[in-house]
Image: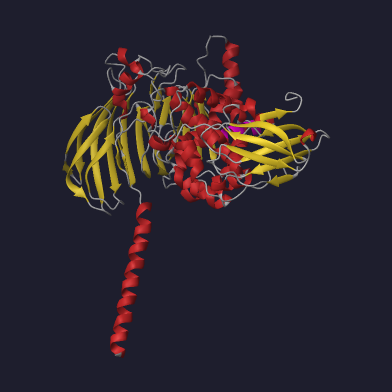
Amino acid sequence: MLKNKLSFFIAAFLLLFTFLITDSTAQNAGNWQQAVDYEMDIDFDVETNRYQGQQKLTYHNNSPDTLDRVFYHLFFNAFQPNSMMDKRSRTIADPDSRVRDRIFSYDETEIGYQEIDWIKQNGEEVEFTVKGTIMEVHLNEPIAPGESVVFEMEHEAQVPLQTRRSGRDNAEGVRYSMSQWFPKIAAYDEMGWHANPYIGREFYAPFGTFDIEIHIDRDYVVASGSILQNPEKVGYGYETADMQVNRPDGEKLTWHFQAEDVHDVMWAADPDYTHTTAQVPDGPILRFFYQTDPVAENALEERQSDLRANWEALPELTVKAFQYMSENYGDYAYDEYVVIQGGDGGMEYTMGTLITGNRNLRSLLGVTVHEFVHAWYEGAVANNETRDQWIDEGFTSYASAFITNHVFNNGEGDPMLSRYNGYIRMAQSGMEEPMHIHADHYVTNSAYGMASYTKGAIFLHQLGYVIGDDALKRSLNRFYEEWKFKHPTGYDFIRIAERESDMVLDWYYEYWVETTHTIDYSVKSVADSNGNANISLAKNGVMPMPLDVEVEFTDGSIKHYYIPLRIMWGQKDNPYPEIERVVAEDWPWVFPEYELSIDRPADEIARVEIDPSGRMADVERTNNVWEMSSNN
């Protein structure tokens, strides 16, 4: 009998142990991500604007899936007549002014292309199919879970005229802005392959290491969002003249760059670059590459002098901005960051940016700040930008607004409120689209920009209104620290915000991100009820919100009334500790009206205002205020 009982308990323990192991495995199954190691050798011809390339890619399949094919991006193929980028630009209602119909008129020397000579899997050639900017590789052998495979290829490319981030000979005279320049394996995650054709929007790729050698005419200075490994071999100095010192003989120099824990590397090259540096205290080295002799809007020497002066002033201001970002949103994840004059506007990359440089100082710093903040969100956090582009663009827009306000205005005022009017106009126009749409599939560029940049930034600022600024700041820091290098989603962020605020916030995410429902609350009336004032409030819009209601009395005193939403299951701290606050009964979101009772007579109430902070994105603020003088 004892033996039978012992056998029973052993069997039960083994069953429980098996369940725990299985459950633990299931819990961890969603945390995997693919990894890559690139080795590239590029032989560049500045006369033809072409290069020959060799690439070795070690691909680590950390997924639970067996892969029977892989996909690569060939971005330069977008810059050809009748490509998807060209056709999209010529048919969308509001095309990017930098593209429009330019690509359609390119001749054979102006187009871009990437041609694959051959590709091998573990030393054996494999078949592949190229359609536009995507290459499908038909594997000889499937890649099993946990297996690593080596892909080798030879390819050649032609750099297009400067068009939408990439290209040669931009409007300011920079010879090469090399972004999206190499055959790049597509991202694979729990949703499968993300082999999206390049039409000019967002990017998504696995983290890994890059080892790149670039052989280019010895007169060129190369700048890259990565770490130079052989500065002594290329005469690397602080000024263009110094870069010519002690360079080896020969037609070309080899520039060797490396980067770790990144998902992309860009570079630029020009014979006229000046290089300066600045050190962020307890932070990275900042590098700046700009034209010694800028191509100004006119040939006036004083104009060129002004442009050089702006670049000379930029490093000190950027250090100040970097410090603010690190102190408030988390430490920068890498050892260096580079700001390079090039491209056709401003575009972020993990350890650097390409920006046009012929700007006034405020604009130059503004674009620099916006792009380097991307190093936190596009670079280190690296969510899937094609699907959740509002995280990268919105969080960056939010943080950069406060950084530039700190640098230029000593932090006075609320730099976010000016963005609300643009959102309200879009919401009222009927052209707004939800934030969770794939970046390539917005009907208009305007709707994409509004959802990604403006509404993405308001997502955070308005969330601060809901949960309080301290909880928001803790949420942003915790999100960065817990999710950098892990490709999180918007739900990962909102779960952190819930933990930091002790609130339920799924409703906020669902309404603001997944719909275009708007907020509209109003003060309907103030009436007397048995000696007390009865303030009647109305929910006119579809999206519910908690309310801060400010009541000013005829004696000049002010009291705040806080009305939580019933579905929040929590409340924020008083954002105005110097003003008395009363926490009222919560508002069930299905109720279109709410009665707020005030323990003073109605004739002692001079003014009532919903959300005096202006941080709730109410689309009709004119009905947020009731005043005695206008209602008598």
Question: How are the colours assigned in the image?
Answer: secondary structure
- Which residue is outermost to the bottom? 1
The vertical placement of 497 against 424, above or below, is below
The vertical placement of 31 against 158, above or below, is below
Q: Position of residue 599 (x, y in %)?
A: 76, 43
| Residue 16 visible within the image | yes
Say which quadrant the C terminus sits in.
Answer: top right
Q: Does the magenta-highlighted stretch encompass residue 542?
A: no
Q: Residue at x 48, y 45 (%)?
A: 506
Residue closest to the eye, 191 or 182: 191
Main secondary structure of the magenta stretch: helix
Locate residue 3 relative to residue 246 in the image: left or right. left
Q: Position of residue 361 (x, y in %)?
A: 60, 23
Residue closest to the eye, 406 or 37: 406
Say which quadrant the N terminus sits in.
Answer: bottom left
- The span picked out in magenta is 400-406
Q: Quadrant of residue 99?
A: top left
- Which residue is outermost to the top? 299
Residue closest to the eye, 541 or 416: 541
| Residue 343 visible within the image | no
